[in-house]
Every structure is written in C-alpha cells, then in structure tokens.
Image (cartoon, helix red, strand yellow):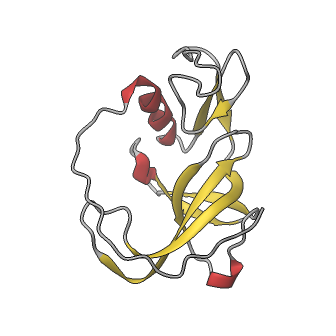
C-alpha cells in the first residue's frame, strides 16, 4: 500500500439536512451511555459492523435488530487519516486556529471503521497501522459526541 500526502485543499462544503439515525444507530448510541461499543454481525457472511448496519453491504442480507450484537473494546487500528485547518464537527465552515487530525479507525473485532478526531498527537507520531484508544466524554449522553476522539495507546 502506498501513501499519498495531500498538502492543501481549499473549498467549502455545506450540507443542511435533517434525519433520523434509525433503530440500529439508536442501539449503537445507547451503548455510548455506558461507554460501550456495540457492533452487529451479519448472520450470513460474518462481517462485523461498527457503526452498525441494517443491510450487509456484501451479501445484501438484512441484519436483525434484536440478534447478532456484540460488545467490542475501546481500542483499534488507525487505517487512514488527514490533517485539516477546518473544523469538521461544526455545521458551518470555520477555520481552526491550528490543524486538526481526523482518523479512520477500525475498532478491534470490527471489519469496518469509524471517523473521529485524533487527539494529543504530534504530527510525526501519527502512522497508519498504529494502535489507538477511544477517549470518552466524562458524562456520556448517548450521542456521537460521547467519543471525543482517539488517543495513543
């Protein structure tokens, strides 16, 4: 695998929308309240999804809501990352005072990845394949912001 570094990319992305995350993601976020990562597993091919899916992308089987759930740990592997001057958690385009590192992390035991900030890293410390750990909010409420980001193990 080769790495490609993008030095700079300017632009504005705006997406105004409203949606409901559905029963599968509700169950996922309910786990956040107890600082737990819940995954679901396809009964046909065995693919483990974090975040969970309603339909398996490989075999197109609907994953049952009340079956095939598993609790995973809070560590994973960094599979990709980017550094940006824009805050990606805000709905409005806003330049940050410093660069932000955003990582795609495959939680151990999962076959898919989630995207969150990489926290407290020096730029030369971040490497694809490194082990990272979830930094949970002090008082989780059952939503995406309960994971503040990932830190070095």
Tell me if residue 140 can be seen.
Answer: no
Residue that appears at 74% across and 39% down: 109
All told, the count of numbered labels is 0
- Residue 79 occupies which quadrant of the picture? bottom right
The image shows residue 112 at horizontal and vertical percentages of 64, 41
Residue 64 sits above or below residue 93 on the image:
above
Residue nearest the viewer, comparing 120 with 14: 14
The image shows residue 47 at horizontal and vertical percentages of 70, 29
Residue 10 sits above or below residue 60 on the image:
below
Relative horizontal placement of residue 77, taking residue 118 as reference (left or right): right
Residue that appears at 68% across and 83% down: 124
The image shows residue 140 at horizontal and vertical percentages of 43, 48
Residue nearest the viewer, comparing 91 with 132: 91
Q: Quadrant of the N terminus?
A: bottom right
- Residue 5 occupies which quadrant of the picture? bottom right
Residue that appears at 55% across and 14% down: 64
Residue that appears at 59% across and 66% down: 81
Q: Quadrant of the C terminus?
A: bottom right
Relative horizontal placement of residue 140, taking residue 75 as reference (left or right): left
The image shows residue 31 at horizontal and vertical percentages of 51, 36
Residue nearest the viewer, comparing 4 with 24: 4
Relative horizontal placement of residue 18, taking residue 124 as reference (left or right): left
């Amino acid at each position: 695998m080769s790495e490609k570094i993008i030095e700079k990319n300017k632009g504005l992305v705006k997406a105004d929308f409203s949606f409901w995350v559905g029963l599968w993601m509700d169950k996922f976020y309910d786990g956040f309240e107890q600082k737990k990562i819940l995954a679901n597993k396809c009964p046909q091919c065995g693919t483990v999804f974090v975040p969970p899916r309603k339909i398996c992308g490989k075999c197109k089987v609907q994953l049952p809501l009340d079956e095939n759930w598993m609790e995973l740990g809070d560590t994973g592997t960094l599979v990709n990352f980017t550094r940006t001057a824009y805050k990606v958690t805000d709905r409005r385009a806003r330049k940050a005072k410093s660069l932000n590192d955003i990582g795609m992390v495959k939680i151990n035991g999962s076959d898919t990845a989630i995207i969150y900030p990489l926290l407290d890293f020096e730029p030369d410390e971040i490497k694809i394949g490194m082990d990272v750990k979830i930094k949970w909010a002090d008082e989780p409420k059952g939503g995406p912001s309960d994971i503040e980001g990932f830190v070095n193990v």
